[in-house]
Image (spheres, grey):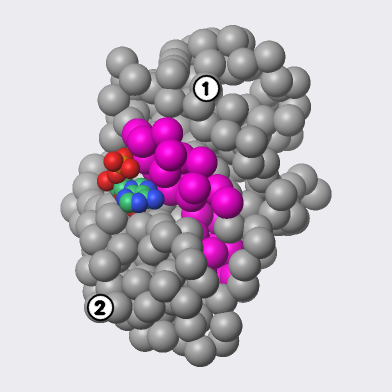
Amino acid sequence: MTVERLPRLALRDGRSIPAVGYGLFQVPSEDAQRLIEQALEAGYRHIDGAAAYGNEGAVGKALAACGIDRDEIFVTTKLWNADQGYDSALRAFDRSRELLGLDEIDLYLIHFPAPERGLFTETWTAFERLHEEGGARSIGVSNFIEPYLQELLASANEAPAVHQIEVHPTYQQRSLQELSRAHGMVIEAYSPLGRSADLTAPAVVEAAEQHGRTPAQVIVRWHVQHGIVPLPKSVNPERIVGNLAVDDFVLTEDQMRAIDALEAGNRTGEDIPHFN
Ligand code: A2P
């Protein structure tokens, strides 16, 4: 069995996060419980879900069935746009807790800024309360491109511990990463493989051949060496195992630079300002 042998990353709130997570975006809900159990069996100890993915119930069932100590598994979920606002965020958090079967969630994220709703600063105040009360062990945001992140930070009492954004070799958002890091956030990467499109990039394939690894392992390793927490997803049992097995090789500086140079503005996810 592969286990998560990479060191955890420290969070600004005193907690820590496993270096790689299993992402649940677009994992079909009917398959989710089985796949999460496979991921846990493969050694993942970090599950990245969201209310909007419709699989919190499956996460709860997998956690209950897996026989692994609850505190060994880092569980993230996210607040959906329609639930933004102070009271509605608190209510949505309770619904998520119920579906997950957990009193405390390791990381609770605002899924999107949804700027036209005008509610993310108020929502963040609710998140600060959830953190203070301990229901959310850590709190953070997702998809907060610069103007929204600045606005949130201007009114926040506590900065987010984590910023989850789209990052992969052909879409790196480096200035947003830098701004987030300057405020003490750990970066998590969703669509870390570029939804598989980046697996065929020559610099990736070449490094994979040189190390005798898969292109996916090379990209996961590239994230890890940048101090980013990637959340690769796969519905294929062999790939689920392989994507985690990146603790026993190191990309050279040249290989890192060649992959860094793949930046091409290839966003695969939502157009944030217009996603409400
Ligand atoms: P599959 O589920 O069939 O393995 P991302 O995490 O960037 O969103 O990418 C997910 C996509 O990458 C999925 O289409 C997934 O397909 C594919 N994928 C994940 N791991 C691998 C791998 N090790 N080799 C090839 N494709 C992969």
Specify the farthest residue to the right. Answer: 14
Residue 252 quadrant: bottom right
Residue at image position (62%, 72%) is 250
Q: Check residue 63 in the rendering and tell me which mark sits there, or answer none.
A: none
- Image quadrant in which the C terminus is located: top left
Residue at image position (48%, 49%) is 243
Taking the magenta stretch, the answer to whether it contains residue 30 is no
- Residue 222 image position (x, y, % from top left): 51, 69
- Residue 257 image position (x, y, % from top left): 47, 86
The answer to whether 50 is drawn above or below residue 204 in the figure is: above
- Mark 2 crowdedness (10 Å alpha carbons): few <14, some 14-19, many ≥20: few
Q: How many marks?
A: 2
Q: Is residue 153 visible?
A: no
- Image quadrant in which the N terminus is located: top right
Residue marked by disc 1: 37
- Residue 162 image position (x, y, % from top left): 58, 52
- Residue 109 image position (x, y, % from top left): 50, 40
Taking the magenta stretch, the answer to whether it contains residue 241 is yes
The answer to whether 22 is drawn above or below residue 203 in the figure is: above
Amino acid under label 2?
A: Ala
Residue at image position (55%, 48%) is 244
Write down the region rendered in magenta.
220-245
Q: Is residue 228 visible?
A: yes
Residue marked by disc 2: 264
Depth check: 176 or 264 in front?
264
Secondary structure at badge 1 equals helix
Residue at image position (44%, 18%) is 33
Amino acid under label 1?
A: Glu
201 left or right, relative to 169: left
The answer to whether 16 is drawn above or below residue 54 in the figure is: below
Earlier residue among tags 2 and 1 = 1
